[in-house]
Amino acid sequence: MNRPAKTLLVGALVVVVGLAFRVSWNAQRDIARTVGADATAALLYPFVVDGLMALALVATLVLTGTDRKFALRVLAGYTAASLVLNYVHGLVPALHNGTAGRLQLADWAPANWSLVLLATSLPVGSIFFGSDLVAKILHHRPADVAPVAEAPAPAAQSVVPAVPSEAEPKPVPRKRPAKPAPKAPPSGRRSVDDVLADARTATADWPVTDLTADRIRTAVKCGAGHARTVRDVLRAERTTPELPAAPAVPAESEAVAA
């Protein structure tokens, strides 16, 4: 369908909707007067009901998913309410007289109460549902960009493998670098003699009472076993008295003895 035809179709639809609203407006205005609305409120009452129907219809065209389902429910509910009000207006001829004042919408009291509740609750519902629909429309974000069609892949070209010429040098395989020889493990622990030599130097000015295994181990950085052995040796050296030297023999005595 070309653009002028679409424009004509939309224009015709607007005209039909406008005429239908005028017919419905008459019935809803009369019912609004019956439930206590003043002249101005009764004049605006049809816009509350049928106007929200138009807003819900627009929302169904814009929203998606659960929001669209909600808009459809609002549209269906207010359409049914408008239908009931128009039906009651047709059943009660006294409503057609604008000066009739307040009337019973139904002979049965529960039915009358239900119709009055319906007519008076529609404006409140219009405020609630209308605000919610407008908020959903304002926060709706359509899909950013339509998926771009993939470009057709170029036709595969047949590739003939090149035959190596005899004159071409053959590739020389690269040699892998030799792995470095593992380093020799560090030497073992120090011997007792080495620890003893270090301990003699470190504890030269210590009193005998300070010669403990813990202090020696901390001073010379050795194991607990070596520390105990060195402690015992150092204590023995510090506590054992030195033997007196033997007296020298005179030369003459040596000669006589010879």
Image (cartoon, rainbow, N blue to C red):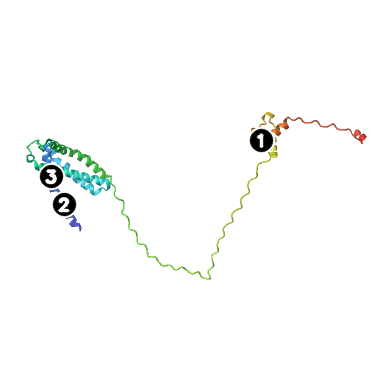
Q: Element at badge 3?
A: helix
Earlier sequence position, callout 2 versus callout 1: 2
Q: Which residue is mark 1?
A: 227
| The label number, if any, that marks residue 162 in the structure image | none
Q: Element at badge 2?
A: helix
- Camera-side mark, 3 or 2: 3
* Callouts 2 and 1 close, C-beta under 8 Å: no
**Label 3 to label 2: alpha-carbon separation:** 16 Å
Horizontal relation, residue 72 to residue 218: left or right: left
- Against 209, is 125 above or below? below
Q: Is residue 39 visible?
A: no
**Label 1 to label 3: alpha-carbon separation:** 111 Å
Q: Residues within 10 Å of mark 3 (few under 14, many from 20)?
A: some
In front of the other: 15 or 109: 109
> Residue lying furthest right in this view?
256
Q: Which residue is mark 2?
A: 13
Q: Residues within 10 Å of mark 1 (few under 14, many from 20)?
A: many
Q: Residues within 10 Å of mark 2 (few under 14, many from 20)?
A: few
- Camera-side mark, 1 or 3: 1
**Label 2 to label 1: alpha-carbon separation:** 108 Å
x and y percent of residue 249 in the render? 87, 33
Q: Say which amino acid is labelled 3.
A: Ser
Q: Which residue is mark 3?
A: 24
x and y percent of residue 6 in the render? 19, 55
Can you tell which quarter of the image residue 219 is in?
top right
At 18% across and 57% down in the image, what residue appears?
A: 5
x and y percent of residue 53 in the render? 19, 45
Q: Say which amino acid is labelled 1.
A: Ala
Q: Quadrant of the C terminus?
A: top right
